[in-house]
Image (spheres, rainbow, N blue to C red):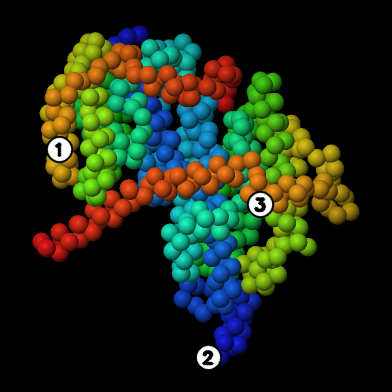
Amino acid sequence: MEMRNLEELFQQKIDQEVKIEPKDWMPDAYRKTNIRQISQHAHSEIVGMLPEGNWISRAPSLKRKAILIAKVQDEAGHGLYLYAAAETLGQSREQMINDLHSGKAKYSSIFNYPTLTWADMGAVGWLVDGAAIMNQVMLTRTSYGPYARAMVRICKEESFHQRQGFETLLVLSKGSEAQRALCQDAINRWWWPSLMMFGPRDSESTNSDMSMKWKIKRKTNDELRQQFVDMIAEQVKLLGMTLPDPNLRWNESRNHCDFGEINWDEFWQVVKGNGPCNKERLEARKKAWEDGAWVREAAQAHANKQRTRNKAA
Amino acid sequence: MQQALFDYTLYLADSALILGQRNSAWCGHGPILEQDIAITNITLDLIGQSRSLYQYAAQLKGGDATEDSLAYLRNEREYKNCLLAERPNGDWGQTILRQFLFSCFQRELYTQLTKEKDSTLAAIATKSLKEVNYHCRWSGEWVLRLGDGTAESHTRLATALENLWPYTGELFKGVEYELALGMDPASLYTPWLSAVQSTFEEATLSLAPVASCFMQLGGKTGIHTEELGYILADLQYMQRAYPGCDW
């Protein structure tokens, strides 16, 4: 069949909401965009383990410790499904990890911010996972089948994490004066970086048009960001805390919250590698991988020996 | 309150918690994603066991004691964990071997505890034993991979054995509260050694270099290595910095 027909058929499927599956024909750019996006998403889950992992040893109660460990472990599980989903497009996990370590592949910039106090465990769950969910709920309907199915499972766990994060903050908000101060401080520090998670403004986003046409994405960055602001502006009232934006107010005519301007210079600096923890995060991942090299080699050598022994037997 | 039972329960709880605390440092830093998840499961099991045990100890103590007051507000000399649990993570080989030696011991101990007349300890042991059997299997498989794998992995595992073996003697040396309860662990040594040896043989790991090493004692009676102070400083930081808060 001619390329043109293949492309038409492909677009027809997309338009009719038929999922694209690994063995189906797809345009190269569709494959590449999905590999880029899914692997970047996988890397974000794995790098995202680091800022929260930072508080595992110091969690303030045994229950909180167990919850936090289980949560960070869930992120590892998400990374695993996502690497597997990207592998169905013909990219090996090892190659994806190499691309992360060389700086060729990106991960979500939010994880380049530090977790300075225990309250950050609540703020990260509520705001960061909350922002991620906006995107992820949309992705449960993305056009590439393995990605969409991975997202269904991930979303269930993420929305649980968001509630846990909120509950962590709720306890702080009802606690001592020092606890309430921790809570407000964490919200102040995580609010703007969370808004940046939705990416550049629609007018500046380079990958958006084709992604919308191919239904990889179904809502624009600005639409999702607005939805998030509207949701959080309500939820923060339950905590009796405030969001650090003097321009935040309900706009009756738009039926949405107005909000202030994101510091785009900071956004691009963090994307370019100049955020507070970019170096530490990447170094930690590289160290884990390099320190683990002899372990992976040993497991492989043992498996090879076993195979030879079994054949001989 | 029955002091010996309380101390004994704390010994079990502290050992599980401190090893869990140690293992938890691997979360996000494991050699491969699947194993990062696996060791984190074991961490969660150990912390879960410690919680059940602390809750029981708190009940024995009465008053306003809770699982958290016991875990977070006792000092170095009051902790009763075995020394093995507090040894540093080192490399993956040392972490694996520490888990294997400990889990094989826990398997013998908990098997015995399931027959114990104290029904709470027996119930906790019965529940935990399912987990411990998996810990033995998982860590045993890794001992085999590392012992049999490459020259480097074999050497690393042998080094870990030299580092850790001196802390195994304590497990089988009864202290006052164990003896008072009629829980002399000496009888667990033979089945433990036989299980350990059988995996070591398969992994071509020799016990000869450590056969006559001098055994370190003290953890169970609160005389620890220098490691514990730092572990508790980390573990207890929030409760010490913000006393009397709910979290």
Provide residue A153's location: percent of width, then percent of height. Answer: 51, 55
* For residue A54, side relative to residue A228 (left or right): left
The amino acid pointed to by label 2 is Met
Helix, strand or loop at label 1? It is loop
**Label for residue B77?**
none
Percent x, y of residue A292:
38, 47
The residue identified by callout 1 is B206
Q: Which residue is mark 2?
A: A1
Whether residue B191 is visible, yes or no, is: no
Quarter of the picture containing the C terminus of chain A is bottom left
Chain that bears disc 2? A
Q: Within 10 angstroms of label 2, few (less than 14), some, or many (20 or more) residues?
A: few
Q: Dot 1 surroundings within 10 Å: few (below 14), some, or many (20 or more)? A: some
Of the image marks 2 and 3, the number of the one nearer the N terminus:
2
Q: With respect to residue A23, does A78 lie above or below?
A: above
Mark 3 neighbour class, 10 Å CA radius: few under 14, some 14 to 19, many 20 or more? some
Question: For residue A271, which numbered disc appears in the image?
Answer: 3
Q: Nearer the viewer, mark 2 or mark 1?
A: 1
